[in-house]
Image (spheres, rainbow, N blue to C red):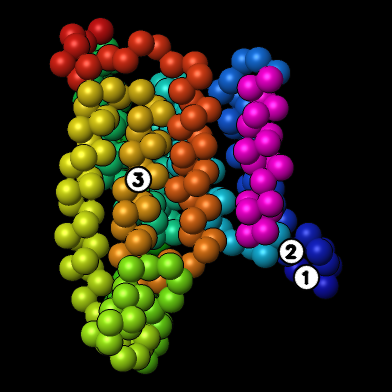
Amino acid sequence: LKPVLGPLTDYRLITVGGLFFLTWLLTRRVKTWSQKITVVLLTLSNPLLWAYAIIGCNDLLVTTAIVGTTLLIERRRWWLAGAVFGLALAAKQVAWVVSPLWIYWLWHITRHTPHPWKNFKQTVIGAVTIAGVIFAPFLIWSAPKMFTDLVTYAGGAIPQTYPIAGTTFLQYLRIFHIVYSPYTVVPVYLFQLLVGVPVFFLTASWVRSNSQPSRWLAGAAVLLLAIMMVSRFFNNNFLTIPAILFGAAYVFQHHEAEPQSSDARHD
C-alpha cells in the first residue's frame, strides 16, 4: 500500500491521532472552557507527549484506550468499554499490569447497578473477546514463540538479549556490582511481584473506599509506576503512561458525584 498511499501508511499518523483523540476524550469529561483549556495544556501543549507521539510510540494509544474504557464504564456502555480495554490488552503489556485493578474497580462500579453480574460479565467478555481475536492468529501460528516475545524476552530471561536500561532501580544492581553486565539474567518478575502485590492491595483499598473513576485512574498510575521502577527496563517513553493517567484522574475529579462507599446499598 505504501507506493499508492504514501505518507498515509506512516504509523506515526496513528500515534499523533491518538494524542488528539485523547484530548477530545478528556474535553468531553469537563464542562467549562477554562477546564477544557486546562486539558489542552496537559495534552496538546505538552512537549513530552508530542516527543513520543511523533516517533510512533504506542504508549499514547494504550493510555487513550484506558481513558476511553473509563469514560465508557462511567456512561454504562459495558460491552464497548470492555472492547476498548481489550484493545489496550492487545497493544502493550502495561495494560496487563493494571487489569487486576481494572477488574476490581469494574466490580465495585457494577455492583451498584440494577444488573451487577450481567454488566460485569458483559464488560469482561468484551475485553477478552477483542484481545482474543487480535492474539488468535499469533497463538495459532506459534503460542510458544508468542510467549517468548511478549513475556520471556521482555523480562530479560533470555541471556544476551535485552539489557537493563532506563531509570529502573535494577540499575543499582550494577552500581553496587551485584551484577556486572546489563545483559545478566535477573529474576525481575520476583521483584515486580514483591513490589506489585502490596501496591495493588493499597490501590485496591483506594478503589474500595471511593469507586469514582479518578480514584481508579490514579491507582492505575501508582501501580504502573511501582512496577516499572523495578522492571528490567524503564525507558523514558513509558513514563508518559502514568503521567497521562495522573492527568486524567485530575480531569475526571472535576465532575464526580459524592464518594460512594463499596458498602453502600445497590440501586
Instruction: Single out the mark in the foreground, 2 or 3.
Output: 3
Mark before the other along the chain sequence, 2 or 3: 2
Q: Position of residue 239 (x, y in %)?
A: 49, 56
Q: What amino acid is labelled 2 in the image?
A: Thr
Q: Which mark is residue 9?
A: 2
Q: Earlier in the sequence, mark 3 or mark 1?
A: 1
Q: Is residue 151 left or right of residue 26?
A: left
CA distance separating discs 2 and 3? 35 Å
- Magenta run includes residue 50: yes
* Residue at image location 36% in from the left, 52% down from the top: 224
Q: How many marks?
A: 3
Question: Disc 3 and disc 1: Cα gap in Å?
Answer: 41 Å
Q: Amino acid at mark 1?
A: Lys
Q: Is residue 176 magenta?
A: no
Q: Which residue is mark 3?
A: 222
Residue in the foreground of this view, choosing between 6 and 160: 160
In the picture provided, is 189 more to the left or to the right than 141? left
Decide: few, some or many residues near mark 2? Use Cα within 10 Å; few <14, some 14-19, many ≥20. Answer: few
In the displayed structure, would residue 75 be above or below residue 126?
above
Dot 2 or dot 1: first in sequence order is 1
Residue drawn 72% across the image and 56% down it: 13
Q: Main secondary structure of the magenta part?
A: helix
> Disc 3 marks which amino acid?
Val
Q: Nearer the viewer, mark 3 or mark 1?
A: 3
Residue 2: which numbered mark, if any?
1
Q: Which residues are magenta?
A: 34-53
Residue 220 vs residue 100, the one in the foreground: 220
Q: Position of residue 225 (x, y in %)?
A: 37, 53
| Circle 3 crowding by C-alpha within 10 Å: few under 14, some 14–19, many from 20 | many
Contact (CB < 8 A) between labels 2 and 1?
Answer: yes
